[in-house]
Image: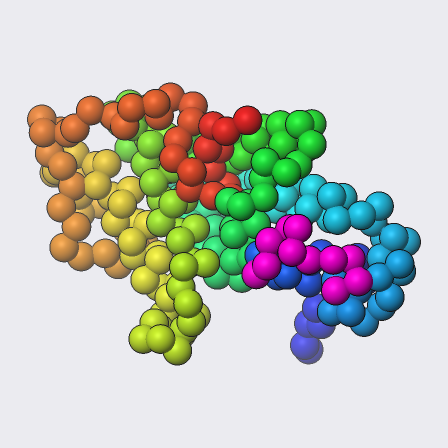
């Protein structure tokens, strides 16, 4: 028996094409008529679904932040019986899927977040902080001796790594295919987190990553946590609360 994926609704089609066009040409570089043409309806017909471009932008950025958080919580619950290593592996898999399949939303977040109304921008930040703290809790459960600020900085750093996918110009330019790119991101993410483990525990730090040759810092040589990591982090894009506005 085959499982059929439900066809996207007209509203979902509009959002997908709007995200792509906004990412390619900027929010102000795209008109309602162009979004309508991409979907196959008249520009004015879009107003039956959205009040305007601002409403589309808000739904895209609030929507992806909420989807990441909800998906992360589901993954954490499903993998809980396997312990924190299994939960972290599942969270990484989910974020890799997002980073490869929703690259326009990463670009859109980086460029256009400040265009949201204050209430929508605060909601995006609130959802992102909750998503970060979900990861931080799992990381600290797995690497119990790691200070909270250091665990949070590591999570932000991994988000920055995974959210770098919009900079991949094309899989044809010497990059692996999707599966190969996913495996590369997987190894890098697990390797980054494995560096949090004390030296004797390195071999067990990332059991599902298949990473070899990663050399974490010895506990006596661990550097101080990244400055400012106690709640905000670098502008690592969707998923991480970057401390702006």
| Residue 21 in picture, x, y percent from top left | 64, 61
Give the mark count.
Answer: 0
Foreground pick, 28 / 225: 28
Name the residue rendered at 35%, 25% in the picture: 229
Q: As drawn, is 20 to the left or to the right of 133?
A: right
Q: In the rendered view, how is the structure colored?
A: rainbow
Residue 132 relative to residue 173: left or right: right
Q: Residue at x 23, y 56 (%)?
A: 211
Is residue 86 or residue 175 the one in the foreground? 175
Quarter holding residue 9: bottom right
Q: Is residue 46 left or right of residue 213?
A: right
Instruction: From the top left corner, tell me how far across and down residue 193 is, in percent.
Output: 29, 42
Give the residues in magenta.
24-34
User: Residue 17 versus residue 218: which sits nearer the camera?
Assistant: 17
Q: Is residue 176 above or below residue 93?
A: below
Res 102 seen here: no
User: Where does residue 119 sit, x and y in percent of width and height?
Assistant: 69, 27
């Amino acid at each position: 028996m085959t499982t059929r994926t439900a066809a996207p609704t007209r509203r979902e089609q509009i959002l997908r094409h709007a995200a792509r066009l906004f990412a390619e040409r900027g929010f102000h570089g795209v008109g309602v008529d162009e979004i309508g043409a991409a979907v196959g309806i008249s520009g004015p017909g879009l107003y039956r679904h959205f009040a305007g471009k601002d409403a589309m932008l808000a739904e895209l950025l609030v929507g992806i932040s909420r989807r990441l958080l909800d998906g992360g919580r589901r993954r954490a619950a499903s993998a809980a019986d396997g312990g924190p290593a299994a939960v972290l592996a599942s969270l990484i898999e989910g974020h890799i899927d997002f980073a490869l399949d929703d690259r326009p939303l990463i670009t859109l977040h980086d460029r256009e977040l400040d265009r949201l109304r204050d209430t929508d921008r605060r909601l995006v930040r609130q959802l992102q902080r909750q998503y970060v703290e979900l990861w931080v809790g799992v990381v600290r459960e797995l690497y119990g001796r790691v200070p909270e600020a250091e665990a949070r900085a590591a999570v932000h750093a991994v988000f920055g790594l995974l959210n770098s996918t919009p900079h991949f110009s094309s899989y044809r330019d010497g990059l692996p295919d999707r599966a190969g790119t996913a495996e590369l991101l997987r190894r890098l993410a697990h390797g980054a987190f494995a560096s949090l483990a004390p030296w004797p525990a390195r071999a067990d730090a990332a059991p599902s990553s298949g990473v070899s040759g990663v050399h974490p810092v010895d506990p006596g040589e661990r550097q101080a946590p990244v400055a400012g990591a106690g709640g905000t982090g670098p502008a690592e894009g969707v998923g991480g609360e970057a401390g702006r506005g």
